C-alpha cells in the first residue's frame, strides 16, 4: 500500500479505479451549485469548455523539463469522468435546479433554456435548517425531528438511499454562511458531539449535522463556506475513523485568490506592507446573507487569516509587524452575482520609501467558484479511493482551493497559492509513484 521505494523503483499507490457513477450531494442549490451543475451538463454536451477547472484542463509535468512529458491531470490520475457524475442536493426552498439557476441570474437565459429539461429533473430534498444560524433566510422546505440526532439520521437515510443508485458519493456544502462561533466542549470528541446531537447543543449548527451524517457514512465532505463545520477535533476523528476525507473551508475565488498571489510576491522580494484595505460590493443572495453582522464575522475571520500566515510578521517584524488589514463586504443588489472588489495596498521599499498598489477585480462570483467546487468533489473522490490518503482525515493538498486551509494540530496552514499548487501536484505525483519535482534543476548543467 502507498507509494513505496523499492530499490530506487517507485510504485504507485493502489488507487481504486473511478468506475461507475459518482454521486455528488450538494447542500444548498444556490448560485454556485446551479452554476456548477449547469456547467458540467454544458461541458458534457459539448456546448462549452470547463474553463477554470484544473482537473479538466490542467496538465502535470513528469520527469525532467527535457523529457517533454506533460500529460493532462485527468489522464494521469484516475478521476471520475464528467459523464459519470450524478447530482442531487438539499435546499430550504423547493425550487428545482432550473428555477434556482434562473433566480441566481448567473447564466444567461439562452444557456439555461438549452439545459432546462435536464436541470428541471434535479429537485432538492428537504434541508436541515435553523434560522438561528442564518438570520437572513427563512426556509420552508425543511426536515423536522425531535432533536439534532434525528435530523442527522434523516440525512444519513438520504445518503444511504442515494448510495443505492450510484457507486460512490461525495457531499459538498455550498449553502449560506452561518453565524460566527468558536469550537466548544461539544466539538472536542465524537462522543461529546453525539451527546450534543441528542441534547440539541446550540454549538451544533446545521452544517455540522450534514458533515456528521456524511462522515458517519464514510463519505468525503467539502465545505465551500467559512462556517465552523469540519474544523474541530470530533470531525477530524470521525473523518479518520471512517476513511472519509475532509479539507478546510471557504472557496478561494476572488479577492483572497488575488491576495494569496500578490502577498507571496511582495514577501519574496522583501517589500514591506503597511496596510491592506479590501472592499467588495455584491448583490446576490450570498451578499444578502453576509449583510447580517454575524454571518459577515464568519467570512471576515476566514478572509483575514491569509495575510498573517503569508507575511510571517514574527520572522519579518521590520516589514510586516504593523500591517493594518481591513475587509469590507457591502450588499449592493444592482450588481447581482457580478462582484466588484477593490484593494488598496500601502507598501514600502528601499530605505522605507512608500508606494501603493491598487487592484480592481470585476469578477463573477459563481463563475469563479463553480470549477473550484467541481475540482474539490473530484479530488475528494480520488482521495477516498487512494489507500494512502483516505484515512489521513485532512487533505492538506487541497488547500489550493480554500481561503481557510485546514492542517494538522500545531502545523500552520500554507496560504501561498504557488506553494499550494506545488503541494497539490506533488501529491498527485507521489500517489502515482512518479518523481517529485523540486525545481532544483542543477542536473541540466552537469
Ligand atoms: N461564489 C464565491 O465566490 C464563493 C466563495 C467562497 C465561498 N462562497 C460561499 O459559498 C456559499 C454558496 O454561495 P452562493 O453564492 O451559491 O449562495 P446562495 O445564497 O446563492 O446559495 C446558498 C443556498 O443555500 C441554501 N441554504 C441555506 N442554508 C441551507 C441549509 N441549512 N441546508 C440546505 N440549503 C441551505 C439557500 O437556500 C441557497 O439556495 C456561501 O456560503 C458563500 O459564502 C462563495
Image (cartoon, rainbow, N blue to C red):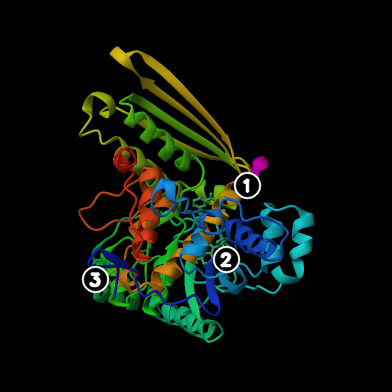
Give the vertical position of 277 relative to 200 (above or below).
above
Q: Is residue 419 left or right of residue 364?
A: left
> Hey, which quadrant is residue 193 in on the image?
bottom left
Where in the image, quadrant-wise, is ligand 1 located? bottom right
For the residue labelled by badge 1, is the local secondary structure a helix, a strand or a loop? loop
Q: Where is residue 123 in the image (x, y as percent from the top left)?
A: 65, 73
Query: Would you name the residue on which mark 1 appears?
Result: 337
Tell me, yes or no, whether the highlighted magenta stretch contains residue 200: no
User: Residue drawn 28% across and 66% down?
Assistant: 9
* Helix, strand or loop: magenta stretch: helix
Q: Position of residue 251 (x, y in %)?
A: 47, 52
Q: Is mark 2 within 8 Å of ligand 1?
A: yes
For the residue labelled by badge 3, is the local secondary structure a helix, a strand or a loop? loop
Q: How far is mark 2 from mark 1, CA to CA?
A: 21 Å
Q: In this view, does 47 lie to the left or right of 256?
A: right
Query: Would you name the residue on which mark 2 appears?
Result: 139
Cβ atoms under marks 3 and 2 closer than 8 Å? no
Cβ atoms under marks 2 and 1 closer than 8 Å? no
Amino acid at each position: 500500500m502507498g507509494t513505496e521505494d523499492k530499490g530506487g523503483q517507485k510504485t504507485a499507490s493502489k488507487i481504486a479505479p473511478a468506475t461507475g457513477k459518482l454521486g455528488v450531494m450538494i447542500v444548498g442549490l444556490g448560485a454556485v451549485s446551479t452554476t456548477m451543475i449547469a456547467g458540467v451538463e454544458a461541458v458534457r454536451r459539448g456546448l462549452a469548455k470547463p474553463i477554470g477547472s484544473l482537473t479538466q484542463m490542467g496538465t502535470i509535468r513528469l520527469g525532467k523539463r527535457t523529457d517533454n512529458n506533460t500529460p493532462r491531470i485527468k489522464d494521469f490520475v484516475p478521476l471520475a469522468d464528467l459523464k459519470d457524475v450524478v447530482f442531487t442536493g438539499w435546499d430550504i426552498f423547493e425550487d428545482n435546479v432550473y428555477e434556482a439557476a434562473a433566480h441566481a441570474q448567473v447564466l444567461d437565459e439562452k444557456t439555461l433554456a438549452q439545459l432546462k429539461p435536464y436541470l428541471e429533473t434535479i429537485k432538492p430534498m428537504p434541508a436541515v435548517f435553523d434560522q438561528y444560524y442564518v438570520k437572513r433566510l427563512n426556509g420552508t422546505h425543511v426536515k423536522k425531528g425531535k432533536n439534532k440526532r434525528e435530523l442527522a439520521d434523516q440525512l444519513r437515510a438520504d445518503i444511504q438511499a442515494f448510495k443505492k443508485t450510484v457507486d460512490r458519493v461525495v457531499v459538498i456544502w455550498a449553502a449560506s454562511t452561518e453565524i460566527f462561533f468558536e469550537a466548544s466542549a461539544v466539538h472536542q470528541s465524537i462522543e461529546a458531539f453525539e451527546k450534543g446531537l441528542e441534547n440539541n447543543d446550540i454549538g451544533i449548527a446545521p452544517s455540522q449535522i450534514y458533515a456528521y451524517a456524511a462522515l458517519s457514512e464514510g463519505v468525503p465532505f467539502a465545505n465551500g463556506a467559512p462556517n465552523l463545520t469540519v474544523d474541530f477535533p470530533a470531525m477530524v476523528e470521525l473523518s479518520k475513523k471512517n476513511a472519509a476525507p475532509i479539507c478546510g473551508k471557504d472557496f478561494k475565488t476572488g479577492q483572497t485568490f488575488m491576495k494569496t498571489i500578490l502577498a507571496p510576491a511582495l514577501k519574496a522580494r522583501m517589500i514591506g506592507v503597511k496596510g491592506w484595505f479590501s472592499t467588495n460590493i455584491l448583490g446576490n443572495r450570498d451578499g444578502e446573507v453576509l449583510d447580517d453582522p454575524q454571518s459577515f464575522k464568519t467570512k471576515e475571520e476566514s478572509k483575514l487569516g491569509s495575510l498573517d500566515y503569508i507575511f510571517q510578521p514574527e520572522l519579518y517584524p521590520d516589514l510586516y509587524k504593523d500591517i493594518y488589514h481591513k475587509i469590507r463586504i457591502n450588499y449592493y443588489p444592482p450588481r447581482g452575482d457580478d462582484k466588484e472588489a477593490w484593494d488598496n495596498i500601502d507598501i514600502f521599499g528601499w530605505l522605507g520609501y512608500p508606494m501603493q498598489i491598487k487592484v480592481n477585480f470585476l469578477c463573477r462570483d459563481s463563475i469563479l467558484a463553480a470549477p473550484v467546487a467541481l475540482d474539490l468533489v473530484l479530488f475528494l473522490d480520488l482521495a477516498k479511493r487512494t489507500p494512502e490518503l483516505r484515512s489521513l482525515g485532512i487533505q492538506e493538498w487541497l488547500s489550493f482551493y480554500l481561503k481557510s486551509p485546514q492542517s494538522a494540530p500545531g502545523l500552520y496552514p500554507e496560504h501561498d497559492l504557488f506553494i499550494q499548487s506545488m503541494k497539490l501536484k506533488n501529491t498527485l505525483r507521489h500517489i502515482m509513484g512518479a518523481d517529485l519535482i523540486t525545481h532544483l534543476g542543477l542536473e541540466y548543467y552537469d
